[in-house]
Amino acid sequence: MSGTLILGGAILIFFIAYLTYGSWLAKKWGVDSSRKTPAHTSADGVDYMPAKKQVLLGHHFSSIAGAGTINGPIQAAVFGWVPVLLWIIAGGIFFGAVQDFAALFVSVRHEGKSLGEVMESVVGRKTKRCFTIFAWLVMVLLTAALVDIAAGTFDGYPIDEITGNVVKNSANGSVATASMLTIPLAVCFGFINRTNINLVFSTFSGVMLLGICIVSGLMFPIYFTKNIWLVVIFGYILAASVVPVWVLLQPRDYLNSFIFYFLMAGAAAGIFLTNPEVQLEPFTGWKVHGETLFPSLFITTACGAVSGFHSLVGSGTTSKQLNSEKDAKLIGYGTMLIECVLAVIALIAVGCLTKDGAYADIGTPLQVFSTAVGKFFAAVGIGEYGELLINTMVLLAVSAFVLTSLDTASRLGRILFQELFKTGKGFHSFWGNRFVAAMITVGTAGLLTLAGYERIWALFGVCNQLVAVFAFLAASCWLKRTGKNHKMLYLPMLFILVTALSSLCITFCNNLKVLLDKADVDSFIVQGVQNVLIVPIFILTLAMVFDSCKVLFKRRKTMEDCED
């Protein structure tokens, strides 16, 4: 199958969906550009602050389009390229983009508050607390994982997997230098952007300096051990989670988004110019390597089609910066479709290198992606050095987005923790303090990193999709109570719920089998802990669904507090 045909067809379908289905959703929900957004009505200079749509688009895209968008489709490719492509297209248009748009819009109409606050107003305080605690724990787990990944990516003295010896790694040192240099650059750009300087001029200058940061990283790598980087990164996110959004979060994400734009544009150009042949089988079977297509495909693809993390970003940070409601479709619905294009490129990448989706001989999913993109350019005639440079640039770009997602995840964790202690009179004076909330959130993530988050990481994919279920529930309840069309959310909500619960049941049974077969200390620590957590997650999910459905399927009541 032609890679050009797959990518070109997908882009055309996404573009049509944005113009049609995205516009239909905006009309049905009553998006109104004349209404003032919370960024204006609740501006505080810290979390609430209007941003130009180009800047906010960059922030939102950088936050949601992490390495998972590449990893997911490549890992799911073991089932063949057809089911993965169909899920990216259908899931992105009718599931992921709808969730992102709905979460952003509902939060904007609810004073920029999180989905937990929305749930409290339409379902009840108990449901709000359950959701907020669950989402906070997911963010803590994600923060712990991202910090560990970032520190490993920066590690100048990793252990060679073959020899077991410590080696000096210049590639990791280059990534570390480039990533660290972007921090002061982002701060300077944030202050400059606060003036009346032309955005096009400042962006051009910022992107040029960003390129210099990357080149400097290649020329002057930094060599620190992983443990030192763990301390540095935890200190960094502690500060990043409390400083005003315009100081670091907005400008860093905006500038970093251009790395991904260039990455996607370059990869797409390479595909269109070389027209690579996808040798991966269209369909490899319903069960591959012990994993069944349902639910594994839909959990594994994750950010490539739908991700609950996106709803937390939309309602946690983006809604507080939206300058006008007319930008909600572009940032909420459109950004997800752009991410889907990246997922299709990742699928083509693994499809051109393997016949059965097995990529272990090539390396990690990110290495598969960088190798494929390098080959696309090599076929154009850039030479071996150019191919090597492209590989390095791809890895640098993806690594930079680990920190970008980390910035957002830690800030979301801080905000969610604060909301746990919000009362009718405002935040609790101590526990609701943003500095206290940040220290507790980051500190908990640090303890989880030391304790070994890997033991429960297998549950993250399911928990992430359950957040999407809760996002659909919150949006559905709010839209119904305000008299707006919400039935387009039912099918995505039900499908993801069944998928996630099925995955939990399968994981529980598989873990139980391992425990019964091995019954050793390692099994009890890993599979045992996972099963202990699965039970309350399952019960909590059913309880929240039950409470929300009581609101959805009873006679509608007006809610004056939610809608003028």
Image (cartoon, rainbow, N blue to C red):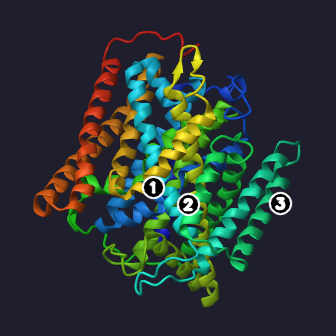
Q: CA distance from mark 2 to mark 3?
A: 31 Å
Evaluate whether residue 24 shows in this view.
no
User: Residue 518 is drawn in which quadrant?
Assistant: bottom left
Instruction: Residue lying at the far bottom in this picture: please name it.
Output: 384
SS category of the residue bearing label 2 = helix
To which residue does mark 3 refer? 205
Q: Dividing the image into 4 quarters, which one contains the N terminus?
A: bottom left
The residue mark sitting in front, 2 or 3, is: 2
User: Residue 538 is drawn in which quadrant?
Assistant: top left
| Residue type, numbered disc 2 | Leu
Find out whether the residues at labels 1 and 2 contact each other: C-beta distance under 8 Å.
yes
Where residue 53 sits: x, y (%)?
A: 70, 42
Say how many tags the image has: 3
To which residue does mark 1 refer? 449
Instruction: Residue lying at the far right in this picture: please name it.
Output: 196
| Residue type, numbered disc 3 | Ser
Work out whether 412 lies above or below 302.
above
Dot placed on the residue nearer the N-terminal end, 2 or 3: 3
Report the residue at 37% width, 81% height from top.
361
Work out whether 94 lies above or below 71.
above
Where residue 427 sits: x, y (%)?
A: 58, 22
